[in-house]
Amino acid sequence: MKLNCDLGEGFGNWQLVDERTVMPHIDMANIACGFHAGDPVGIRHSVRLARECGVQIGAHPAYPDLVGFGRRSMDCAPEEITAMVLYQIGALRALCAAENTHVEYVKPHGALYNDMMRNDAVLRAILEAVAGAGGQLPLMLMATPRDDDYRKLAAEYSVPLLFEAFADRRYTPEGRLQPRSEAGAVLHDAGEILQQVRDLQRGQVTASDGSVIALAADSVCVHGDNPQGVATIVEIRRALGKD
């Protein structure tokens, strides 16, 4: 499995993470496109660093919600969602072209991602955008027991899919992420995170009630927005046999 990480989310001198410490240890960089975070200079820096490290670049579009970091759902019509996703892919593609590289996939951010996973109308609007962007870009979704349904829906738009799992999030018995508002939703213990990654590599995850759920993921999402997170990414690479 490949490791993916959300990057390009700083503004000016304010940066969430020193991306030079993260980028060498991941395979895929989900780079913000300016709607929930990031500025053009910082995004271009992330693109350049990804190219130098041989990391795949993914567009990380979101609702236009800088204040809420893209984590607040917005009541947008499907045509609005399609247009905003197309707009963000295009912006990142321009910066990639300037750095002699290119966008290789799309992974929505925050509330847009969550809405996509629970509302097929939102998912269809995003699929229409990805298809309209051209280049046969894959769309990254969360791996769930519904994967076959998502594949059938995406096939209507001729959009390939990538499925991801999360290294540091607790899963519900239904195979969804436990809401961040609930205690224990985010895993902080490095040992627990590493065990979850090993389980995911075997195609399964242990839910909050102790049940074991089958999940087939192409990639694992990791977070490197603090020094402990960066150290954990290094350990995750080792657990996956990448180093």
Image (cartoon, rainbow, N blue to C red):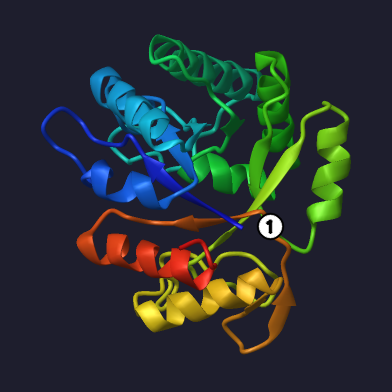
Q: Residue at x 78, y 64 (%)?
A: 145
Q: Give SS at disc 1.
A: loop
The residue depicted at 80 percent of the width and 46 percent of the height is: 150
Quarter location, residue 168: bottom left
Q: Residue at x 24, y 35 (%)?
A: 10
Vertical placement of 242 versus 52: above or below? below
Q: Residue 57: x percent and y percent?
A: 49, 32
The residue under label 1 is 143
Left or right, 60 with respect to 16, comes to right
Determine the residue located farthest toward the left in the rendered image: 13
In the rendered image, the quadrant that contains the N terminus is: bottom right
Task: Specify whether 212 is left or right of 18.
Answer: right
Mark 1 is surrounded, within 10 Å at the Cα level, by few (under 14), some (14 to 19) or many (20 or more) other residues, namely: many
Measured as percent of width and height from the top left, residue 233 is found at: 38, 62
Write the residue at 69% across / 18% down.
Answer: 135
- In the drawing, does residue 75 fall left or right of residue 7? right
Image height check: is 85 above or below 107? Answer: above
Q: Quadrant of residue 136?
A: top right
List x then y, in percent, for residue 28. 50, 42
Quadrant in which the C terminus is drawn: bottom left
Q: Residue extending furthest front?
A: 243
